[in-house]
Amino acid sequence: MTSTVELEKVAGLIDSAQQTGEPIEQFGESLDLQTAYDVQAKLLAAREARGEKLTGVKLGFTSAAKMAQMGVDEVIIGFITNQMAIENGGQMGLDRLVHPRVEPEVAFRVGRDVSAGATADELVAALDAVAPALEVIDSRYRDFRFSLTDVVADNTSAARYAIGEWQPFRRDIGDLAVSLFADDRIAEMGTTSAILGHPLNVIERIERMLPVVGYPLAAGAIILAGAATAAIAVNGTRRIQAVIADLGQVELCVNQLSTNSERQEP
Ligand code: OOG
Ligand code: MG
């Protein structure tokens, strides 16, 4: 599928699903990987036209736990915007979400502008902070099922994110214990080594993938390195917290009164 009309149509369907929380069917074979990234670029353009600002990039499927959970085994890249940001400890509404899940991540902050052609060494040299993060993913496809190209077109299920207190950038974060709590009960445990062996290994992937998508990383941009454990469904949970040993914690509160909850998975 290469025609511009089709590209616009797919992007339009995904964009409206992202805005309304109404699920859509998968596109399947009709999308190849390049077309899926072209759809993603259209989604960003539509959001920017509505006044949203790019805040960074996210990687997906950087851990075996996530690949196994979703049956996809290739690292993918998506974008995040200011509209997706929730402050640490802040409220997340469920309206406009289909069936959100939450996962614990490591976030890096870029301290100065870097170009799309930057090398991994240049990228690492530009990092100035690291923090624990929560990513809320929400596949717009029915039943949270998709192929690799479907999920790329759906901006890698990016929906919301919260970042804990930024710490000065450091490299010794390769094997820190990660815990995910749902209403103060432990839901998932893992280690940052689950993220490609060391979260900093994502930078080399970004070096390779940034030229494909061309998203600029300006000073202050965030890089979400990918989940260290499987994701958990939000469902009726009110408070979700991730703790990363030595790095700190991050949490969000779910506003269960906001609607769309009838569409969530059991
Ligand atoms: C795709 C996004 C994967 C991660 O951290 O691995 C991702 C999905 O699971 O829906 O964000
Ligand atoms: Mg993620």
Image (spheres, rainbow, N blue to C red):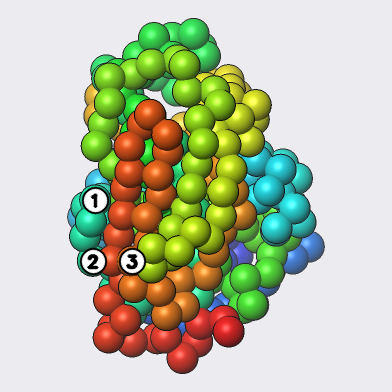
Which one is in front in this view, the residue at disc 2 or the one at disc 3? 3
Who's the residue at 42% across and 34% down the image?
Answer: 245
Q: Amino acid at mark 2?
A: Gln
Going from the N terminus, do you reach mark 2 or mark 3 first? 2
Query: Residue 22 location in percent, x, y?
Result: 47, 82
Who's the residue at 69% across and 65% down the image?
Answer: 146
Q: Secondary structure at mark 1?
A: loop
Query: Residue 25 location in percent, x, y?
Result: 64, 77
Label 1 beta carbon within 8 A of ligand 2: no
Q: Which mark is residue 239?
A: 3
Image marks 3 and 1: residues in contact by CB distance under 8 Å: no
Label 3 beta carbon within 8 A of ligand 2: no
Residue 52 lies left or right of residue 36; in this view the side is left
Q: Secondary structure at mark 3?
A: strand
Can residue 232 be seen at all in this image of the molecule?
yes
Residue 87 lies left or right of residue 145; in this view the side is left
* Callout 2 crowding tier (Cα within 10 Å): few <14, some 14–19, many ≥20: some
Query: Residue 9 location in percent, x, y?
Result: 54, 69
Who's the residue at 38% across and 29% down the image?
Answer: 246
Whether 143 is drawn above or below 110: the answer is below
Whether 51 is drawn above or below 109: the answer is below
Residue 169 lies left or right of residue 64; in this view the side is left
Q: Which image quarter is the C terminus in?
A: bottom right
Name the residue tied to disc 2. 91
193 or 196: nearer the eye? 193
Label 2 beta carbon within 8 A of ligand 2: no
Can residue 56 be seen at all in this image of the molecule?
no
Q: Secondary structure at mark 2?
A: strand
Name the residue tied to disc 1. 88
